[in-house]
Image: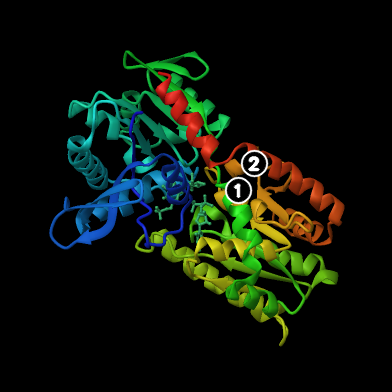
Amino acid sequence: MSRLVIVSNRVALPGVPSAGGLAVALQAALEETGGLWFGWSGNIDPVESGRLHDRTEGNIRYVTVDLSKRDHDDYYNGFANRTLWPLLHFRVDLVDYSRETYAGYRRVNALFAEKLAPLLREDDLIWVHDYHLIPMAKVLREFGVRSRIGFFLHVPMPSSDLLAALPQHERLFEGLSSYDLIGFQTERDLERFQDYVRLFGRGRVIEHGVLETKGRRLRAGAFPISIDTAHIVKQAAASANRPGVKRLASSLSGRALAIGVDRLDYSKGLPERFRAFERFLKRHSGQRGKLTFLQIAPVSRGEVAEYQHLRHELEQLAGHINGVHAEPDWTPVRYVNRNYPHPLLTGYYRLARIGLVTPLRDGMNLVAKEFVAAQDAEDPGVLVLSSFAGAARELDSALLVNPYDLDGVADAIAVALAMPLEERRERWQAMMTLLQANDITTWRRNYLMALRGI
Ligand SMILES: O=P(O)(O)OC[C@H]1O[C@H](O[C@H]2O[C@H](CO)[C@@H](O)[C@H](O)[C@H]2O)[C@H](O)[C@@H](O)[C@@H]1O
Ligand SMILES: O=c1ccn([C@@H]2O[C@H](COP(=O)(O)OP(=O)(O)O)[C@@H](O)[C@H]2O)c(=O)[nH]1
């Protein structure tokens, strides 16, 4: 059986908490199959990049690389998260491109390939993840790696005209032709990628999911990532006795809970969500005081200016809403910049009557799926979900909203709060059936079967 080699920027090192769906999903996938996980160590080396760390826990070998401050700034804070992240989330207005950071991005990809290549075996299945590592396969081929290499994009693939706004986009995206298989979260992402290859990539679509570019044939498909459904169901059922869950439950004083859980990221639409919640308080004054909104938002990419601005905006908004609407015995918005362990989060989801997942654009959003899986089948909560999250393609029994329509989100909150038990059960069961059919194992198996089949 071929060894699975996962390559990603973020690595879920044992005992090191990190918010983010990629790490959560890949950890669950690798626990099933075992293998090698290669990526950034999370450490900044004061002198230079390249120091390796090698540890094995159970059936997973973790090999990670330290980066110098300059490399981390150029590759991660710079090109990955100030250029590619906004571009891939349809925010060309926020794209900050420089040749220096692009050179750093390519430099770090070359370093990762140089460190990884000696660890590889001929029959490995190499699975590269996400926008940080687009050039990886091309560089590995230059190191003589002939194994099958697949790529998975965890974030949206935007319209090709947006991609074409990126300087040197041809050079960057031509690197995708060195992969044998490219995976996307949704069919829409796949279609937009095919449009790009046809319109700007000087390639052609032979048939849906089969492309030819630079004289090379590659396959592409939609593989919606998911969660370890059975594990979350079990975890949630046992969560009621967790001290943290009991404390939250008693602190609500009988009020219903609406919960949001997101990295502090402008793609998550948190300012719009806060404003929509205030609209709810104004438009549905009869329900005032009956609902408390808890937003958990661990800081993310804190060195990037746009993320710092967002944090200040949310602090102002939360303070404003509470200042205007709170009562001595009721604080409408609870806002927490902290990262909570998964088991505790699961218990919080289960307590909530409403899950508020309203990103402006999101590749998938695993929180939406986790919220559903964590519910009590006898008394499930209601998911209010942005139509612009990848998860909306599957979870269409949620109350789907346009996150830019603040009145619409406000009214959806009111509908969710008043929704009869029977309807809540029907909606929840439809989504739960899907999550049981498409869980993290299905995602991994479907992708790797497609990669092996090439
Ligand atoms: O690694 P960070 O910079 O801390 O960011 C955390 C992760 O954010 C993004 O997650 C994406 O992948 C999820 C799983 O497929 C998906 O549900 C979500 O919609 C995406 O935003 C990013 O793409 C990852 O690389 C980061 O690790
Ligand atoms: O305090 C937190 C906040 C988030 N998460 C996890 O981080 C992931 C977020 O993934 P999602 O796909 O929703 O968004 P991303 O952060 O990857 O863009 C989910 O598994 C959450 O349970 C966590 O463990 N602790």
Which residue occupies the foreground of this view, 32 or 381? 32
Where is residue 274? Give x, y as percent: 63, 65
Left or right, 260 with respect to 131, comes to right
- Name the residue at 59% across, 77% down: 319
- Name the residue at 39% across, 44% down: 84
User: Which residue in the structure is indicated by mark 1?
Assistant: 230
Left or right, 138 with respect to 341, comes to left
Compare marks 1 and 2 and give the one earlier in the sequence. 1
Q: Quarter-wise, where is residue 387 in the image?
A: top right
Q: Does the residue tagged 1 have its C-beta within 8 Å of any atom of ligand 2?
A: no
Relative to 78, residue 439 above or below: above
- Name the residue at 64% across, 37% down: 437
Relative to 128, residue 75 above or below: below
Relative to 45, residue 92 above or below: above
Q: How many residues crowd around disc 2 within 10 Å: few (fewer than 14), some, or many (20 or more)?
A: some
The answer to whether one can see residue 446 in this image is yes
Quarter of the figure with the N terminus = top left
In terms of secondary structure, where does tag 2 sit? helix
Left or right, 446 with respect to 423, comes to left
- Rounded to the nearest angstrom, the CA distance separating label 1 from label 2 is 7 Å
In terms of secondary structure, where does tag 1 sit? helix
Where is residue 241? Give x, y as percent: 63, 71
Amino acid type at image mark 1: Ala
Quarter of the figure with the C terminus = top left
User: Which residue in the structure is indicated by mark 2?
Assistant: 436
Amino acid type at image mark 2: Gln
Where is residue 200? Give x, y as percent: 40, 23
Where is residue 163? Give x, y as percent: 43, 34
Which residue occupies the foreground of this view, 84 or 114? 114
